[in-house]
Image (cartoon, coloured by chain):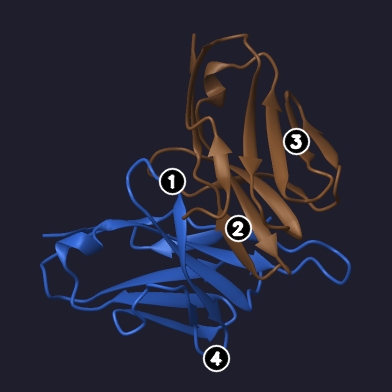
Amino acid sequence: TQLLEQSPQFLSIQEGENLTVYCNSSSVFSSLQWYRQEPGEGPVLLVTVVTGGEVKKLKRLTFQFGDARKDSSLHITAAQPGDTGLYLCAGGRNFNKFYFGSGTKLNVKP
Amino acid sequence: GAVVSQHPSRVICKSGTSVKIECRSLDFQATTMFWYRQFPKQSLMLMATSNEGSKATYEQGVEKDKFLINHASLTLSTLTVTSAHPEDSSFYICSARKNSGVGSTDTQYFGPGTRLTVL
């Protein structure tokens, strides 16, 4: 059983479209991180959110941490082919262990 | 920056042999490192937490006698897959936790992964 559930699992869109990926749990996390992973490589950190209700922006990417710190979302505006990859959320507890979500595979077609 | 390296990047071995994978934090000290495994098209599953100078903490269902972890220094953790079998074939990824200071959020940085294939 996955501690963090991500949706959708797969997403295939055209260049220029917007999308949102969700990361949900019944557990509370002290922090939540979003990563992007390319095939055959390790995950690369995109952002860390720690405060309930926090919103962070990274160029065309907007990250939000839920008020109760149980869920998060990643919104991408005007997606580009370079955004293609596996997006993973990871929840941390007391900054000790990190548990990964089930992953969302994004494909942006030119 | 915060760079984590893994060695080897790929390894192929025969069934029954042991394989050691190294994880190094190159520009920071890490008292805690984590080992994950990832099957094709799946997410990362935490195997164990490696603590410098003490025994590793294993997740439920992970055999500690099969996956030996040693964290002998603040920059190196090793994972040894003993008596490897084909079902152990996977992508093994380590991460190192970088302490950002009191009141700050620790961040984990990932290595590039090691592809293990057991024949």
Q: Are marks 4 and 1 on the same chain?
A: no
Depth-wise, is mark 2 or mark 4 nearer the camera? Answer: 4
Chain for colour brown: A
Labels 3, 2: one chain: no
Same subunit, tags 1 and 2: no
Give B29 or B34, whichever is nearer the viewer.
B34
**Badge 3: few (under 14), some or many (20 or more) residues near its Cα, within 10 Å?**
many
**Along the polypeptide, which appears first: circle 2 or circle 4?**
4
Residue drawn at x 73%, y 23% as measured from the top left: A60
Q: Residue at x 76, y 26 (%)?
A: A59
In the image, which is nearer the foreground, mark 3 or mark 1? Answer: 3
Amino acid type at mark 1: Glu
Q: Secondary structure at mark 3?
A: strand
Q: Colour of chain B?
A: blue
Element under disc 1: loop
The residue singled out by tag 2 in the image is B109
Instruction: State how far apart marks 2 and 4 are (Cα).
Output: 21 Å
Label 3, label 1: how far apart the Cα atoms are = 23 Å
| Circle 4 or circle 1, nearest the eye | 4
Instruction: Give the label on residue A63, or none.
Output: 3
Amino acid type at mark 3: Phe
Q: Which residue is mark 4?
A: B54
Is there one chain holding both mark 3 and mark 1? yes
| Chain of residue at mark 2 | B
Expressed as whole percent of the image width and height from the top left, the position of residue A109 reads 47, 12
Of mark 3 and mark 1, the one earlier in the sequence is 1
Mark 4 vs mark 3: tell me if same chain. no
Residue B22 visible? The answer is yes
Q: Residues within 10 Å of mark 4 (few under 14, many from 20)?
A: few
Using the numbered discs, state the Cα–Cα distance from disc 3 to disc 2 in whole angstroms.
19 Å
The image shows residue A5 at horizontal and vertical percentages of 56, 44
Residue type for callout 2: Tyr
